[in-house]
Image: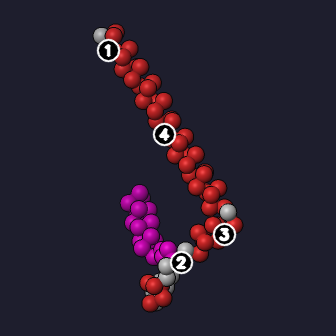
Amino acid sequence: MKKWIIIFLMAFSFQAVAQEKIAITEDDYSNSRVEMADVMRSEGKIYVLVGVIVLIFAGITVYVINTDRKVSKLEKLIKEDS
């Protein structure tokens, strides 16, 4: 029974399509504008985005450094006990 379910799900997955194909034109290759970034920059929101990204990376860095220090302390304790 399990085999049949797997076969059915595999056959069903072959029929799934993520999105329709859109033709690429010559204008798409020559487009150098990024409209979303231009709009965010003109409204001053790009700086908020950059600030949030910097805060997230800083938080991850602090977390990794603290975790490394804790692991180092535990390794020292293990070496002292043995």
Secondary element under disc 2, as helix, strand or loop, is loop
The correct choice, above or below, for 65 with respect to 8 in the image is above
- Identify the residue shown where x is 55% and y is 40%: 59
Q: Is residue 18 magenta?
A: yes
- Please state which of the two labelled residues, at mark 3 or mark 1, is closer to the viewer: 3
Could you tell me residue 82's position as x and y percent?
Answer: 30, 10
Q: Determine whether, in the image, residue 44 is placed left or right of residue 37.
A: right
Look at label 3 and name its amino acid: Ser
Main secondary structure of the magenta stretch: helix
User: Which mark is in front, 1 or 2?
Assistant: 2
- Between the residue at mark 4 and the residue at mark 2, the CA separation in whole angstroms equals 33 Å
Q: Which residue is mark 1?
A: 79
- In front here: 63 or 9? 63
What residue occupies the far bottom of the structure in this picture?
A: 26
Mark nearest the camera among 1 and 4 is 4
User: Which stretch did the figure color magenta?
Assistant: 1-19
- CA gap between label 1 and label 4 equals 27 Å
Front: mark 2 or 3: 3
Q: Which residue lies under the disc numbered 2?
A: 33
